[in-house]
Image (spheres, rainbow, N blue to C red):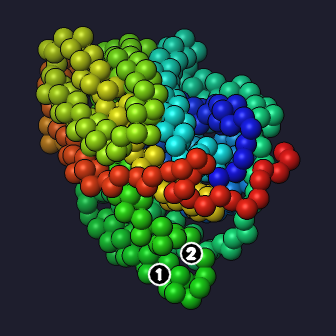
Amino acid sequence: MENVAKPWPALWSLVVGFFMILIDTTIVSVANPRIMEGLRTDINSVIWVTSAYLLSYAVPLLITGRLGDRFGPKKLYLSGLVVFTLASLWCGLSGDVGTLIAARAVQGFGAAMMTPQTMAVITRIFPPDRRGAAMGLWGATAGAAVLIGPILGGILVDGLGWQWIFFVNVPIGVVGFLLVQRFVPALTTHSHSFDIPGVLLSAAGMFLLVFGIQEGQSFNWGTVAGPVTVWGLITGGLVVLAAFVVWQWVLTRRGGEPLLPLGLFRDRNFSLGNSAIMTVGFTITSFPLPMIFYYQVVRGLTPTQSALLMIPMAVLSGALAPVVGKLIDRINPRWFAAAGLLFLATAIGWSSALLRPETPIWLFLLPSALQGLANSCIWGPVSNATVRNLPPRQAGAGSGVFNTTRQVGAVLGSAAVSALIQARLAAELPAMTGATSGERPVSGQLPEVLHAGFSTAMAQSVLLPAAIVVAGAAVAVFFAKPKPVDGWGAATRPAEADVTRA
C-alpha cells in the first residue's frame, strides 16, 4: 500500500480513459448496422470490427500489466491513451472495412496498455478497507458508459455518420491525458523480465481459436485452405494455448518470470474471480449484438431509438454500483456477485422470450431494468473479491490477468455469437443464405415476410450468453470471505517505498 495524500483525484483522472474505452465499445455495437451499410459489408465482417479490437485488447494485457509494474502505471497509461486516441482518428477516416478492422486492432492495443494500470493504481493507493468504494466508482463508470455510449452513438450516427463514434474519442483522449498528467502520481516501479515465447504462444493460440470459431459458418465448418479446416484451426488454437500454460509452468519451475504467474491462482478468490469475470466478458459482448440487429433490422429503429431502450439498465447500474461498492467492504461480495449474475441470466432469457415481431417495444425496458440491477451487483463485487488479497508487488500482474480473462471471454463471446447468428439465420432464413455467408450484407429493414425468421434467429442466439452467465453464478457462490484488514491493510504487506514525484 503506497501513501497517496489524495487518491480520489488520481482515480477520477484514470476513470476518464476507462470511460472512453467502455463508451467506444457500446457506441460500436449500436452503429454496426450503419457501418455495414456505409462500407457495403456483411454481418461477419462488421463483427470482425469488434473482434479485432477485443483480440488485440486481450492478448497483450498480461505483459502490459507487467510493463506498468516495470515502468510505472502512469507512463504506460499515458502511452496507451495516445495510441488509443490516434487509432480512433484512424478508425473514423477509414474508407473500407479492412482498414477499419486494422485501425480497431491498433485501438485495442492502446486499450490494453491502459486498462491494467487503472486496477493496479486502485490496489496500490487505496487501503483494502476503502477499495470497495473505489471499485464502486469503477462500476458506476461502467454503468454511465452503458447509458451515454449508445445514446451518444445513436445521436452521432443519426446526425453526423458512423465515423463520428470514433472521432468523439479525440477530445476525450486529450482531456484524459491532461488530467492524468496533473493528478496521477508516479508510483514505485519493480523490475521484471518479459516472457516473449509466452506472448507469441498466447497470441497465436487466441488468434487460431477466435478465427476458427468466428469464420466457421463462412466456410461451412469445412476446408479453409488446402488441408487446413475450421476444426483444425480451433483444435490448433487449443493445443497452442495448452502449450502456453505448460511453458508457463516450466518457466516457473526454472525460477523465471512467466507471463501468466500461476502462483496467483493459489488464492481461491483470484481463481474463482477470473472464471466469473470471463463469463461476464463473454456475456456483455455477445448479448447486445443480436439485440441491436433485431431493433434496427426487424423493428426499423434508428440507432438513437435502439440506445434509448438501454436507459433503465444504465441508470440503475450507475446509481446502485456505488451503494453496492460501500456494502462489499462489510459484506461478503459473493452474495452480490452470485445474485447479480443470476439476475443477468434472467434478464437475457426474458429478452429472448420477447424477441418477436409483434412485441410492443416498451416491454424491452423491463429486462433492461433488471440488467441494470444485475450490473450493479457484478462489477465491483467480483473485482474486489478477486484482487483484494493480492500483495501490492503483484498488483500489476494480478490486474493484467484479471483483465485478460475478461477480455478473453469477450473475444470468445464475440466470435461465438457471430458464428451462432450466421448459423441460425441460415437455418431460419434459408433464402438469405448468401447474406449470412458473407456474399451480400443484411442491412436496412427486412421485408415483413422475413421478420419472424430473423427474430427467431436472434432469440436463439441470445440464449448462449444466458447459459454462460449461469455458469458464472455457480462459480461466484464459492467465493471465500475476503481476509480481514487492519488500518492500511493487514491482508497485504505495505510497500517499502512511497510514491515518487511525477
Task: Report the residue that reaches farthest toward the front.
Answer: 486
Point 17% across, 28% down: residue: 350
* Residue nearer the viewer, 130 or 119: 130
Image check: 338 left or right of 14?
A: left
* Residue nearer the viewer, 318 or 35: 318
Report, in whole angstroms, how far the alpha carbon at label 2 lies from the one at label 1: 8 Å
Q: Residues within 10 Å of mark 2 (few under 14, many from 20)?
A: many
The count of marks equals 2
Point 31% across, 46% down: residue: 334
Q: Residues within 10 Å of mark 1 (few under 14, many from 20)?
A: some
Percent x, y for residue 317? 40, 25
The residue indicated by pointer 1 is 249
The residue indicated by pointer 2 is 258
Task: Report the residue that reaches farthest toward the right.
Answer: 501
On screen, residue 269 above or below 442: below
* Residue nearer the viewer, 308 or 193: 193
Q: Quadrant of residue 357?
A: top left
Q: Is residue 136 visible?
A: yes
Image check: 48 left or right of 417?
A: right
Kind of residue indicated by mark 2: Pro
SS at circle 1: helix
Percent x, y for residue 99? 59, 43
Residue 309 bears which disc, if any?
none
Point 61% across, 61% down: residue: 493
Q: Are marks 2 and 1 in contact (CB under 8 Å)?
A: yes
SS at circle 2: loop
Q: Is residue 461 visible?
A: no
Q: Quadrant of residue 221?
A: bottom left
